[in-house]
Image: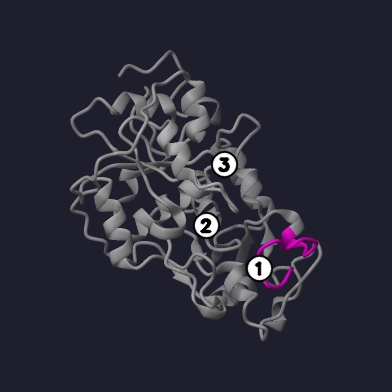
Amino acid sequence: MSPPNDETTRGRSGTAPGAAAEPGWSAPLISPAGLAAVLDRADRPVVLDVRWRLGGPHGRADHLAGHVPGAGFVDLDSELADPQRAGGIGGRHPLPSVARLEKALRLCGVRAGSRVVAYDDGDGSVAARAWWLLRWAGLPADRVAVLDGGWAAWRAAGLPADTGALAPQNGTIVVRPGGMPVVDADGAAVIAGSGVLLDARAAVRYRGEQEPVDRRAGHIPGAVNAPSAGHVGPDGHWLPPEQLAERFRALGVGHGPVGAYCGSGVTAASVVLALEVAGMRTPERPAVLYAGSWSDWSSDRRRPVATGEEPGDPGQL
């Protein structure tokens, strides 16, 4: 499959760390042209379609109607997360068990040495959950990428699509959790007090003006709002590294501790990814994820809540 005349590997988004000068493999972001260039190779990457929408409809129907050639569909709710526990403790999308994640990845053909690309049809936040889990499972940083611009960019580039479902594959990956740092509510409180805790939700939820899903409205005292939608430009592609770095510096990110949370630990993974793309954190020292996120925090009435535009006093934690 030959890619069309496209822009460079990152297109209008600039060059990702480690990207090649010509279209081809790059991580942690890869352009549609770059992915198309490696799909014909013997060591072609495994492609994961993780399209998902809060409140539905289910992304599987979209996958069956059209997807990147050879891509397997992975469901966020049932394969990239464990079932929610009673009382909301642990959040709406708890990290999947080793067995659950291993089964899903093997069915798509992931092996220990695989390169893997994940994509969604939004701003990359859901694909970032798959990227984060693959890294958490033990895959090397240079072998896991998110498709820049997602499904919309693939189609806009005039690239081909398959329909129907991928036949079950015989992947052999062994999930070894621990490749990415995670904290619980107490750990998130420590970061809010000693470093920068970034809240990836929309501003209206951060301020406590709207809360369509979780039990209480507001944010963790001391947390700074960094909506995940701000990682991409109007064209749907990720912002260049220097623009992302400028954004995070303005939010107070420096050399100290930095963590991220959102509603249920999904879009927060895109903050971890964006910090790496920006060069603010390295694969060896990634930002910390509060996996339970606001759905976990707000389920515990003993934990304080801040509202409004200001972070609030982390001293009350």
| One can see residue 109 in this view | yes
Left or right of 81 on screen, residue 247: right
Cα separation, mark 2 vs mark 1, equals 14 Å
Majority secondary structure of magenta residues: loop
Q: What element carries label 3?
A: loop
Q: Let me know if residue 216 is in the magenta part.
A: yes
Helix, strand or loop under label 1: loop
Quadrant where the N terminus sits is: top left
Q: Mark 2 points at which residue?
A: 266
Rendered residue at 48%/72% (across/down) = 183
**Circle 1 sits on which residue?**
214
Q: Which mark is residue 32?
A: none
Query: Mark 3 — residue?
Result: 123
Amino acid type at circle 2 is Val
Give the structural element (helix, strand or loop) at label 2: loop
Estimate the spatial distance between the alpha carbons at disc 3 and disc 1, rounded to whole Å: 22 Å
Dot 2 or dot 3, earlier in sequence: 3
Task: Using the image, determine if residue 50 lies above or below residue 197.
Answer: above
Residue 197 is situated, as x and y percent measured from the top left of the image, at 61, 65
Location of the C terminus by quadrant is bottom right
Q: Residue furthest top?
A: 5
| Residue 149 in picture, x, y percent from top left | 52, 33
Magenta stretch in the rendered image:
205-217
Q: Which of 304 and 209 is in front in this view?
A: 209
